[in-house]
Image: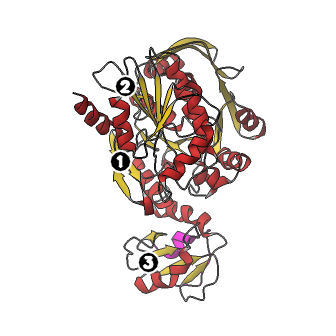
Amino acid sequence: MKLYELIDGLAETTLENIEITDITSDDRKDLKKGAMFVCIKGKIFDGHSVAGQMLKKGASCVVVQKDLGLKNQIIVPNTREIYPSLCARWFSNPQDKLKLIGVTGTNGKTTITTVIKKVFTELGVKAGLIGTCQNEIGDKILHTERTTPEPFDLYELLAQMAEEKCEYVIMEVSSQALEQKRIGPLHFDIALFTNLTQDHLDDHGDMDNYYKAKKLLFSMCDKALINIDGKRGKQYLSEIKCEKYSFSTTEKADFNAYDIKLSASGVEYSFSGSGESLPVKFNMLGQFNVSNSLAVISCLIMLGYGADEVIRAINKTSGVRGRAEVVPTGRDFTVICDYAHTPDAIENILKAIKSCSKGRVVCLFGCGGNRDKIKRPLMARAAAKYADFLIVTSDNPRDENPDDIIKDILAGLEGMDVPYVTITDRIDAIHWAVKNAQKNDTIVLAGKGHEDYQILKNGVKIHLDEREIIAEALKELN
């Protein structure tokens, strides 16, 4: 692609209209001769510091947001903001060939996006999925590193989805991606909000900034679908300017769930919306999955699908990996893997299990290193609210001492009488949980969910799949 074609309307330059062979902001990757290097300033690393090196390695030009005195520099006001637009143009604006559904919020994003994709499949509609667990193009599954990909990866993925004739793309949109302007010129047919509870304050500082970051999604959509069961949802509904609809399990809304029945096998309720009242049976447990499934049904109806066909499809859907996932044991106790890593999420999953458990609820959990320390004692208090026994262990310790993280967690148990043990090594902790399980116990492994790795110091990842560890522990029992 020629330089002027790539930057037209985005930047100005007096450089010759040279051929651009590639575009990147990552100095760690092999650089193609003739590539454009975009210098982005991050929290830890500033791409401007290697601009000169990139030119020596063969870059044809560098995009900067300050004058570095380099011959082949293109100066723009904000490189972070322009980079996604450059990536979109590099891949011929694939988003224009797709209908986009964006889902944001603290909890529920993965379940909602995954189930929307499953419903589309059941309805015979080819769709793509971009999310925390994995990316999908129709039936093809692709590995993912983060909830919302980096701009180049995002637009490359969208280009593949357009090439393979996906009609819809359902995308988890993180607050960090919105605040960092990583998604660029995407425009969503529907932007869906789940809820807002404490998380990512290490990035946003406080809940108001977190709220504002999420709100950005509603400036880039045709229609908004908002959960008004919480005060933040009501606040969004009153503030956003686009066409908007609400859903709720407790308040009068455009779409409602009522006559709710919870059981160990899932949830049942009556759906009300679009002048219809229809029975729903969704195969995932907990009150929060009433809200998640209601969001899915409401979204599909807003897209023009009939309530009857959508509910028939959702009633057939299976669970989501790492979301209240029952791991087979063949024993007289149950093990559940769940991604709950916020106080609200861990309270929700334990409350749901407590309501249908015949024995003790045992919760194994930890907290991530290099992340919001404020929520660590809050996690403990939330877990202690419904668990009968706690096993406090590691999650992804990263660059912190795991024992220091556990100490922070235990501060939340002061004055509470729930019994607990601390076992720093997560593998040892899972083995201990299985070995000491009692009849009718439900053991909840919280925090990892779909993840099959653990992040240690300096970003080193080791393989850690809790399903495999459970199988090993069960062999030892036998």
Mark 3 lies on residue: 19
Q: Earlier in the sequence, mark 3 or mark 2?
A: 3
Q: Is residue 397 one of those drawn in magenta?
A: no
Q: CA distance from mark 3 to mark 2?
A: 65 Å
Image disc number at residue 142: 1
Q: How much space separates mark 2 and mark 1, taking CA atoms? A: 36 Å
Q: Which residues are magenta?
A: 1-17
Q: Give percent across and percent down for residue 468.
A: 29, 38
The verdict on residue 9 being magenta is yes
The residue closer to the viewer here, 401 or 274, is 401
- Answer with the quarter of the image where residue 276 lies: top right
Above or below: residue 382 compared with residue 99? above
Mark in the foreground, 2 or 1:
2
Nearest the viewer among 82 and 11 is: 82
Q: Position of residue 236 (x, y in %)?
A: 73, 38
Q: Secondary structure at mark 2?
A: loop
Disc on the earlier residue, 2 or 1: 1
Query: Percent position (x, y) of residue 298?
Result: 58, 26
Q: Give the colour scheme of this rendering.
A: secondary structure
Q: Which mark is residue 437?
A: 2
